[in-house]
Image: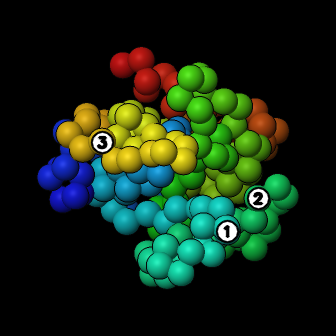
Amino acid sequence: MVFLKLFFDFKVEGRENLPKKGGFILACNHLSYLDPVALGSGCKRSVHFMARDTLFNNRFLGFWMKSVGVIPVKRGRADFAALKKSLRLARGGEGLAIFPEGARRPIDKAFINPEPGAGFLADKANVPVIPAYVSGTYEALPKGVNRKINFGRKILVRFGQEIHIERGKPYQEISNMIMASIKQLSVN
């Protein structure tokens, strides 16, 4: 949080919507590598993130991600080990942060279709799901080869009210409902 407050115009809204105790899932849009930093800094409790396993190939980044409890996920297929670990953490009272879109989306596109894995986790974890919306992170650190950090940009994290998941629905339908709640936060 200190890094974001020092170098950016960092604001958080809706922090009161986060559960004070017990497991929960934070579901957020994804634009930039800064999203996990902003989301984690905005949350008053620690959260475990899921990240593609290839990010762990970088020695420094991999060491750091392991030390803060990031869960590696194999992309392109269902990674049951990562799903089991995520469910165990959420059911055990921990916070779990996910990006239903599955990857950073291009800034010129509206929200992209979420992956069904978000719906699977929400259904099986049986914990509160809190939608979150992050803006300004793409402008602060764009996607691409020539990216550079643009200090001083406004970054906003907005937490919404708990989503009531109707268990047993198709996972894609649950994911779509979660994504719709995230989109709704973008217009407030």
Q: Are marks 1 and 2 in contact (CB under 8 Å)?
A: yes
Colouring mode (rainbow / by chain / secondary structure / one colour):
rainbow
Q: Residue at x 62, y 55 (%)?
A: 126
**Is 71 located above or below residue 108 in the figure?**
below
Q: Earlier in the sequence, mark 1 or mark 2?
A: 1
Residue 14 vertical placement versus 78 (above, below): above
User: Is residue 88 at least partly visible in the picture?
Assistant: no
Dot 1 surroundings within 10 Å: few (below 14), some, or many (20 or more)? some
Q: Residue at x 75, y 33 (%)?
A: 173
Disc 2 marks which amino acid? Arg
Report the residue marked by disc 2.
75
Residue 62 % position (x, y): 54, 77
Residue furthest left as drawn: 6
In the rendered structure, are the residues bearing label 1 and label 3 in contact, judged by CB atoms less than 8 Å apart?
Answer: no
Q: CA distance from mark 1 to mark 3?
A: 27 Å
Q: State left or right for residue 181 relative to residue 38.
A: right
Residue 67 vs residue 108, the one in the foreground: 108
Asked if residue 143 shows in the view, the reply is yes
Name the residue at the front extreme: 146
Residue position marked by numbered label 1 in the rendering: 53
Residue 150 badge? 3
Q: Which mark is residue 42?
A: none
Total number of numbered labels?
Answer: 3
Q: Nearer the viewer, mark 3 or mark 2?
A: 3
Residue, far top: 187
Badge 2 marks a residue whose secondary structure is loop
Cα gap from disc 1 to disc 2, whole angstroms: 8 Å
Q: Alpha-carbon distance for marks 3 and 2?
A: 29 Å
